[in-house]
Image (cartoon, helix red, strand yellow):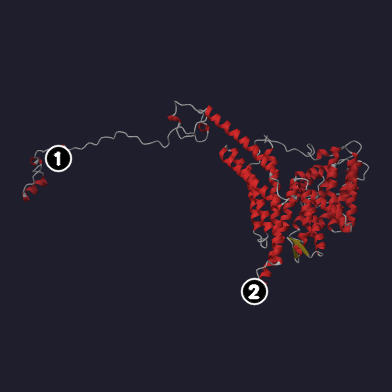
Amino acid sequence: MVVDKPNDSKLPSMDENKENVSDTAVGLEILHIIKDSQQQHGLRHGDYQRYRGYCSRRLRRLRKTLGFKMGNRHKFTGKKITEEMLSDSRYLLLVLMEAERAWSYAMQLKQEANTEPRKRFHLMSRLRKAAKHGQKLEKLCESPSIDAKTKLEAQAYTAYLTGMVEFELQEWKPAMEAFNKCKTIYEKLASAFTEELAVLYHQRVEEISPNIRYCAYNIGDQNAINDLMQMRLIGVGGGMMAEKLEALISQTRAKQAATMSEVEWRGRSLPVKIDKARIFLLGLADNEAAIAQASNEDTKERLYETLLSECRDTIQAVREELKAEKQRERDTDNGKVSNLQFLHSYLSFIKLCTVVKRNESMAHMLQIKLKEPNNDESKRGPKPQDLIRLYEIILQSLAELSTLQGLEEDHSFQKEMALKTLVYKAYRCFFIAQSYVLVKKWSEALVLYERVLKYANEVQSKAKGLGDKNLPDVQELIAEVNAEKYSLQAAAILDTEEVNEAPSQHPVKNNTPLCDRLETFWLDPALVGKHPNLVHFPPSFQPIPCKPLFFDLALNHVVFPPLDDKVEQKGKGGLTGYIKGIFGFGS
């Protein structure tokens, strides 16, 4: 059976169905088409090369369908799209796809330019090419046969590509003007349509806003840095713009760090001479404030990871300087902790405290999810074992905090760490008990609940003298443990009654196979499992009769008759016998 391939002229693609063609005006939903294409063909994962390949294939399909080929395989013959062709919106789509292909190639080169700076020249060439195609699209849309909405979208699209070119050239004022024009058009379009249709325009405006703020800051608007910090906090402007925001923030902190000379911690002033440490300590308060204001857990986790990464890099820089200092002062060791070593301890303190806070935040979210009913059985929900692991990491971090160099003699610090260790031990013990409850080990769980109460009461007695406000509240934990104890005792009593009432239904597990207990009935789930115990295997040995062996003993006592007369006797014939033998006379 032969099946004809569908022709694009007869069966238009899904994206091409979005093109609005009417009797009076031709329309093209530019933003809708490019956003759908980008999301479906690689840009959801930042794969610009895949999207570029899609644009090339779609251009080839459109040219073949429209009969708009640029020559043949041997010779190129350029063709231009004129206003007379605009009765079909696919000619506009052709120009749009050319612009998108050039833009996606530029973005691909921008990713590669991080390791190969020479590719930046090719990047700018492709961006200019995309802007040129955008201007061509805008000029074609000036035709009277094109509807007003398409004209506005073409102007906004061209302004966006022009702004990208100026942005990469660091021409901040023209870039800001182009982005503002693009933003204004999309805002007007959003106000002219219903909320469902306006969502796409609002998303585009949010994408452009970080670029406008970045241009404003580089022009000289110092207030724009606050807007950029807020955008970074809520996660607006991902990808390339996020990298520029981080670089800008680091640059701003580097300028402010020039005035920073020392920091005070645990009653000791520490001179800070390393630039990386200055920049990190200067931005520490901003990072902590951003984490506190984070709107969701994903943003908070991302900010925690950023802070920890910066802290590790700073500690590494201080550690290298510390090695050089130890080599210089090897002969002048007086036992006192140097300022640089104490600074290293301070940075390690910040890192470990951040790890504790991050894991505590994660544990808090898991506790909330653990209390919620899990309606979807196919999806794995949180378990007490997950929380046990988080509290073990916290306890390990607290143990490292207690051994920081320069703080061994700080008794208030050591008491604080010991008290926090007791608190988190109580929480870890609580979730270990809950894991035992899940497997119905009532006695072990009850003993662990008692230990939780012991830790909590010890924390309450010691916290009165210390007066630390940063300690987690154990009063709520005590109330929860008391409630769990009563529930556990009730569950244990009910479980025991069920066993006593129906012993045949819940027998003690033994290794008796089914063939030996055919007269006794009980429900054995193992019989329908993968390894049912039906018979003894391997079977035991059993005695069987042996095959008899026969021995011929009479043969030794039998006397046989003589056979001498039957045996042939050789005579002494001599020559006569020889002759007779030859001629056969003797036979």
Query: Which one is nearer the viewer's eye here, 82 or 521?
Result: 521
Query: Which amino acid type is shown beneath numbered disc 2?
Result: Asp
**Which of 166 and 480 lies nearest the eye of the viewer?**
480
Callout 1: few (<14), some (14-19), or many (20+) C-alpha neighbours within 10 Å? Answer: few
**Does 67 sit above or below residue 240?**
above
The kind of residue on which mark 1 rests is: Asn
Could one spot residue 228 in this view of the protein? yes
The secondary structure type at the circle numbered 1 is helix
SS label for mark 2: loop
Q: Earlier in the sequence, mark 2 or mark 1?
A: 2
Q: CA distance from mark 2 to mark 1?
A: 109 Å
Which residue is identified by label 2? 331
Quarter of the picture holding the C terminus: top left
Picture disc at residue 556: 1
Q: Position of residue 556 (x, y in %)?
A: 14, 40
Residue shown at 69% from the left, 70% from the top: 325
Residue 105 visible: no
Q: Residue at x 68, y 60 (%)?
A: 410
Tell me residue 461's x, y (percent).
67, 48
